[in-house]
Amino acid sequence: MRHIRAAAATALVLALTATAAACGGGTATNGEGSNKSPKKLTYWASNQGPSIEADKEILTKEIAKFEKQTGIDVELEVVPWADLLNRILAATSSGQGPDVLNIGNTWSASLQATGALLPWDDKTFDRIGGRDRFTESAVAATGAEGKDPAAVPLYSLSYALYYNKKIFKDAGIEKPPATWDELVAAGKKVTKGDTYGLALEGSNLSNHIHQAFVLAKQHGADFFTADGKPDFTSDGAVAGVKQWVDFMAKDKITSKSVAEYAQNQSLSDFSKGKAAMVLWQAAASTFKSQGMDESEYGVAPVPVQSGTPGQGEQINSMVAGINVSVFKNSDNLDGAIDFVKFLTSDEEQKILNSTYGSIPPVKAAQQDAAFDKPDTSVLRDALGTSAAPLPQVPEESQFETVVGTAIKDLFADAAAGRPVTTESVKAALAKAEQQMTKS
């Protein structure tokens, strides 16, 4: 997918935790030490645009500016999301990786725990203009609380509800749903024939985590305790997961065929008019690449249980986004930090985020008119007022795997006509929690 993070294999995460000390011993730290290759950098970028090729074209043009300014050659590789985390984990284990890399912000604490990434203390942040240039919500998703961040925010994202204007108009729906009850009612009204109410992806583990996290927050629950221990079977967590699966199992506003959908297939269905609604992060450029004009869809905040979005139980998005990190054992730490400074400069933030339809985590860049459009303003408002970061715990990647898989299996049950009950959801989450505890 464009932005949704793929979860890594549990065994690999555990292996890396055990070898954290070994993979943290680079040639230099915090910008001090040797620079063996001062005129070269390697950069692993995440796939943000509609295709790998599109990203290469976009980023090559921007990187050329940095190369001209510094005389440093940057070797770019755009890595698909399906491969990115496993590639990074292998690199942290072997010590053989790029100088600079993009990471999903939900991975920050997990990768921080390996010891392989450069810590961004105040001194290092000062080299790129200071920590206070970035929004608080974005910095909150750069590593475990109380530790120096393992990354710097690059692209900020939040979820929004996208809806097909024509389908809504034909069904007599005058405004987008603001609560989940309204979404279900609208979904039932438009579900007929080959069209259904809500597009989703039953096999997309990370998307399941994002949606379950938000719904659990709305039910007053977290998936981890205050001291970082798994807590998957609380009433609120169970209710949140069941509500997500019930869009298929109970409400029947999504097709059973989507139980096998992986990344981006829901966006394709929405673009083709096969679904009236989809919950997604900054999807405008993907819709455009699939031939859907921006006049054909509307954008609204993700629904809440009641009332309006806000903090506490009115959270309606996780703090999504992409961070940029530096490998601590880079042969060109100075150049790597300079490259991060370039990517997070006010001007590049405006260019890159407006191109990708994301929101700049840099405060000054957010003021540009490009981010006042209806779709981006919804995303920006969510990030500022009603989004929360996923748990910043070292086991976050494993959490995505075990709980995401549990939800995937529940969707498979729903598609097969097997009952999805509070008891079966709790049992699936208890099994996932045991898998975390045993590790």
Image: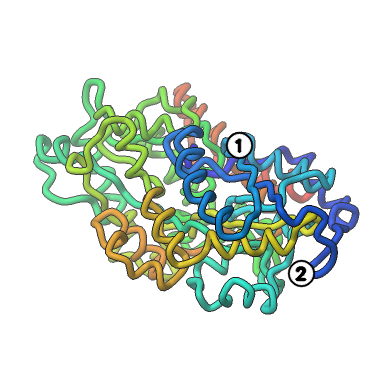
Residue to which mark 1 is pinned: 405
The numbered mark, 1 or 2, whose residue comes first in the sequence reads 2
Residue 57 seen? yes
State the mark number for residue 30.
2
The image shows residue 289, relative to residue 343, as above or below, that is: above
Q: Nearer the viewer, residue 314 or 185?
A: 314
Q: Which label lies toward us, 1 or 2? A: 2
Q: Nearer the viewer, residue 410 or 21?
A: 21
Q: Amino acid at mark 2?
A: Asn
10 Å crowding of disc 2: few (<14), some (14-19), many (20+): some
Residue located farthest toward the right when viewing the structure as drawn: 22
Q: Percent position (x, y) of residue 140?
A: 57, 68
10 Å crowding of disc 1: few (<14), some (14-19), many (20+): many
Residue at 56 percent across and 75 percent down: it is 129
Q: Percent position (x, y) of residue 292?
A: 25, 34
The image shows residue 400, relative to residue 72, as above or below, that is: above
Q: Percent position (x, y) of residue 364?
A: 41, 73
Q: Nearer the viewer, residue 390 or 217?
A: 390
Residue at 67 percent across and 48 percent down: it is 397
Residue at 65 percent across and 48 percent down: it is 73
Horizontal arrangement in the rendering, residue 188 relative to residue 223 (left or right): left
Q: Which quadrant holds residue 50? A: top left
Q: Nearer the viewer, residue 195 or 345?
A: 345
Q: Amino acid at mark 1?
A: Thr
Horizontal arrangement in the rendering, residue 141 relative to residue 244 (left or right): right
Q: CA distance from mark 1 to mark 2?
A: 38 Å
Q: Secondary structure at mark 2?
A: loop
Q: Secondary structure at mark 1?
A: helix
Q: Which quadrant holds residue 379? A: bottom left
